[in-house]
């Protein structure tokens, strides 16, 4: 798992799917505000003129010296809710990300993710 203290060291690393296919590059890590543990990664995907940041859960992820391997298929990650590279994940968008992966959002509608 990516340790919160070392997140900057991982920015720009390749993010691959469960079969080793490159999805994009790691742009950011989002921690669960309840546990303060890394929970999602922001993955920079797309062509230079159409870049966006999609979100993928870190559940069952494997971290190596050169990449982060997700337990999710490439297409599912690429179809996840996204923001522009200069954008900000709004609280109203969070539940859509959890729903996309079939994950439980939690109790109430309070902020669940924080960017590191």
Image (cartoon, grey):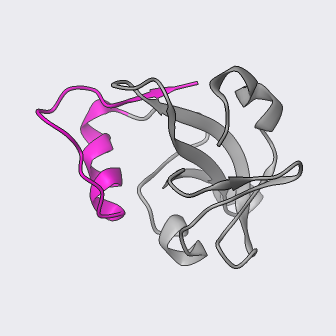
Residue 26: percent from left, percent from top: 71, 46
83 with respect to 102 (left or right): right
Is residue 92 part of the magenta span, yes or no? yes
Q: Quadrant of residue 5?
A: top right
Q: Is residue 93 left or right of residue 27?
A: left
- At x 28%, y 26%, the residue is 111
Estimate the x, y position of residue 10 in percent, counting from the top left: 78, 37
Q: Quadrant of the C terminus?
A: top right
Determine the residue located farthest toward the left in the rendered image. 108
Q: Residue at x 66, y 59 (%)?
A: 45
Depicted 87 relative to depicted 63: above or below:
above
Q: Residue furthest right?
A: 65
Q: Position of residue 113 (x, y in %)?
A: 39, 31
Q: Residue at x 27, y 58 (%)?
A: 99
Taking depth in this image into account, of 76 and 59 the one nearest to the observer is: 59
Q: Which residues are magenta?
A: 90-116
Q: Residue drawn at (67%, 38%), measured in percent from left and top?
A: 2
Asked where in the image residue 14 lies, by quadrant, the reply is: bottom right
Quadrant location of the N terminus in the rendered image: top right
Q: Position of residue 60 (x, y in %)?
A: 55, 58
Residue 105 belongs to the span the image colors magenta: yes
Residue 96: in sight, yes or no? yes
């Amino acid at each position: 798992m990516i340790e919160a203290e070392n997140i900057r060291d991982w920015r720009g690393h390749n993010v691959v799917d469960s079969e080793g296919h490159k999805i994009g590059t790691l742009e950011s890590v989002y921690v669960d505000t309840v546990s303060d543990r890394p929970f999602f990664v922001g993955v920079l995907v797309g062509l230079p003129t159409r870049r966006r940041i999609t979100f993928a859960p870190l559940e069952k992820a494997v971290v190596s010296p050169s990449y982060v391997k997700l337990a999710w298929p490439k297409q599912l990650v690429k179809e996840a809710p996204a923001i522009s590279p200069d954008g900000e994940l709004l609280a109203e968008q969070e539940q859509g990300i959890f729903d996309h992966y079939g994950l439980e959002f939690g109790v109430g509608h309070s902020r669940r993710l924080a960017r590191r």
